[in-house]
């Protein structure tokens, strides 16, 4: 009780490291809207495993290097 | 408008059309009458429904021409499902209300308009919920 689970991510940093990839470019690679990438980036939406894997694949990273699960 | 998905823009079109057209219809149809819907009522209803369909089609065509195609992704589908789960309760409650109205009011005028009002209200609440979720997240 009283626990909040929170998924954080490094998408903003990873986009920066990948030639300032835009949210739209990432969205096109993943097959979602730019607004969904924005919502994920700002932790307003936790994506499905499929989309999470696609994001990690777009950055050629392991899932755990893109998304982190924090218990607070 | 620039930051909205096509789905959000489409929701705004339907929401605006619903509020304007049904608002005008209910203003026109009031004060209500006891008894059955006459031919004049039925034509009036058909006229407003026709206007609603035409406005929505024009709005959707305009959006389709103006905006780049984009996928209806999992977030949009989840937002829709969440809004549906809440509005279903409103619809069921409204159906019960319409049954009560049908038992108390003679003719079909009140029953039809209660059912119609509840359906419109359910859709409007559903669309507002979705628009809110698109903006605030969930």
Image (cartoon, grey):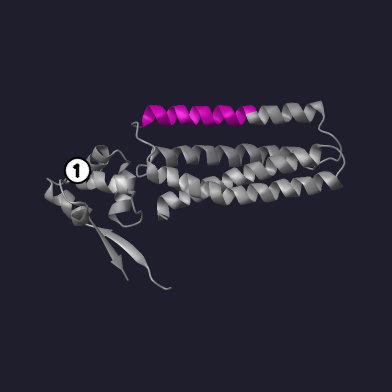
Quarter of the picture containing the C terminus of chain B is bottom left
- Is residue A65 positioned above or below B45 on the image? below
Residue at 41% in and 55% down: B136
Q: What stretch is highlighted in magenta?
A: B50-67
User: How many badges with numbers are in the image?
Assistant: 1
Q: Tell which subunit mark 1 falls on.
A: A
In the image shown, does B18 or B134 lie closer to the viewer? B134
In the image shown, does A18 or B78 lie closer to the viewer? B78
Using residue A58 as the reference point, say whether residue B56 is left or right of it. Answer: right
In the image shown, does B60 or A59 lie closer to the viewer? A59
Residue A24 x/y as whole percent: 25, 41
Let me know if residue B59 is in the magenta part. Answer: yes
For disc 1, the marked residue is: A58
Let me know if residue B101 is in the magenta part. Answer: no
Residue A5 x/y as whole percent: 35, 65
Residue B67 x/y as whole percent: 36, 32
Residue at 84% in and 40% down: B33
């Amino acid at each position: 009780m009283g626990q909040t689970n929170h998924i954080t991510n490094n998408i903003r940093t990873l986009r920066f490291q990948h030639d300032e990839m835009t949210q739209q470019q990432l969205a096109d690679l993943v097959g979602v809207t730019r607004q969904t990438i924005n919502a994920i980036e700002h932790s307003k939406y936790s994506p499905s495993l499929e989309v999470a894997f696609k994001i990690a694949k777009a950055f050629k990273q392991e899932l755990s290097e893109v998304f982190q699960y924090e218990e607070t | 408008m620039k930051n909205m998905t096509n789905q959000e823009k489409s929701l705004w079109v339907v929401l605006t059309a619903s509020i304007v057209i049904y608002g005008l219809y209910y203003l026109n149809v009031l004060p209500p009458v006891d008894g059955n819907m006459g031919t004049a009522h039925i034509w009036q209803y058909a006229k407003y429904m026709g206007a609603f369909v035409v406005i929505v089609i024009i709005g959707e065509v305009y959006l389709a021409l103006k905006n780049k195609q984009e996928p209806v992704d999992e977030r949009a589908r989840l937002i829709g499902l969440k809004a549906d789960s809440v509005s279903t309760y409103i619809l069921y409650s409204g159906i019960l209300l319409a049954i009560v109205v049908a038992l108390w009011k003679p003719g079909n005028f009140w029953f039809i308009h209660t059912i119609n009002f509840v359906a419109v209200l359910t859709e409007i609440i559903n669309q507002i919920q979705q628009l809110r979720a698109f903006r605030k997240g969930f």
